[in-house]
Amino acid sequence: PEITINYAAALAAHDRLEESERLLRRVLAATPRNPTAMNNLAIVLQAQGRIGDAIDSFKQAIVLSPEYANAHYNLAIALLLAGRYADGWREHEWRRRKTRTELSARRYDAPLWDGRERVKTLFVYAEQGFSDMIQFARFLPALRGRTDRIGRLLRLQGIPFTALDKENCTDGY
């Protein structure tokens, strides 16, 4: 089934969604407990605009493999597309556990901040693309009352995250 799943993914990447869906359904008919095939089917359904069906399929993939981080993350995107923001953002936390991503490769010694307690120093970094960085930068001023110092990283295209002016990070952004 792995070769067929990969072939179906290649078809989907070339916008041959109906063919990809047929192959994935064939794999699932033969191996119904295959979480990768179910996840990939859900991706195809989402690309076809069938968001409700995609959500159901992502959930099935997660039932088959509860720790399948990529399926959780993909479910998050589908839920957000469906306007189910509370569920979508909760599932979005799985992005840190996804395989083969720049984010999953980054590890910091400091614990993640959940926003409940005031902290002495808060380290803010851009973990996704520029549009997300611009979108969420507007929330930085709201952090001023929650921390004494905001350290930050900047990601430039093709350049790894690097600290900006470590001596003068207290300005907040």
Image (cartoon, rainbow, N blue to C red):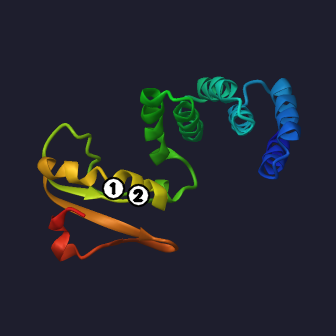
Query: Is 4 above or below relative to 100?
Result: above
Closest to the observer: 9 or 89?
89
Q: Is residue 84 left or right of residue 116?
A: right
Residue 75 position in % (x across, y down): 57, 33
Corner quadrant of residue 110 = bottom left
Q: Regarding mark 2 in the picture, which secondary structure is present there?
A: helix
Q: Is residue 119 visible?
A: no
The residue wearing badge 1 is: 137
Quarter of the rendering occupied by the C terminus: bottom left
Q: Residues within 10 Å of mark 2 (few under 14, many from 20)?
A: some
**With respect to residue 103, does 118 lie above or below?**
above
What's the residue type where badge 1 is placed?
Answer: Ala
In which quarter of the view is residue 93 placed? top left
Residue 112 spot, x, y in % from top left:
29, 47
Q: Residue at x 82, y 52 (%)?
A: 14
Q: Give, as a three-letter code, the residue at label 2.
A: Met
Horizontal side of residue 168 vs 112, given as left or right: left
Residue 58 vs residue 131: left or right?
right
In this picture, residue 63 sits left or right of residue 47: left
Percent across and percent down for residue 45 are 73, 33
Residue visible at 36% across and 51% down in the picture: 136
Question: Pointers 2 and 1 in contact (CB under 8 A)?
Answer: yes
Q: Which mark is residue 133?
A: 2
The local secondary structure at tag 1 comes to helix
Viewer-nearest residue: 147 or 68: 147
Q: Residue at x 47, y 39 (%)?
A: 92
Q: Is residue 60 visible?
A: yes
Q: CA distance from mark 2 to mark 1?
A: 6 Å
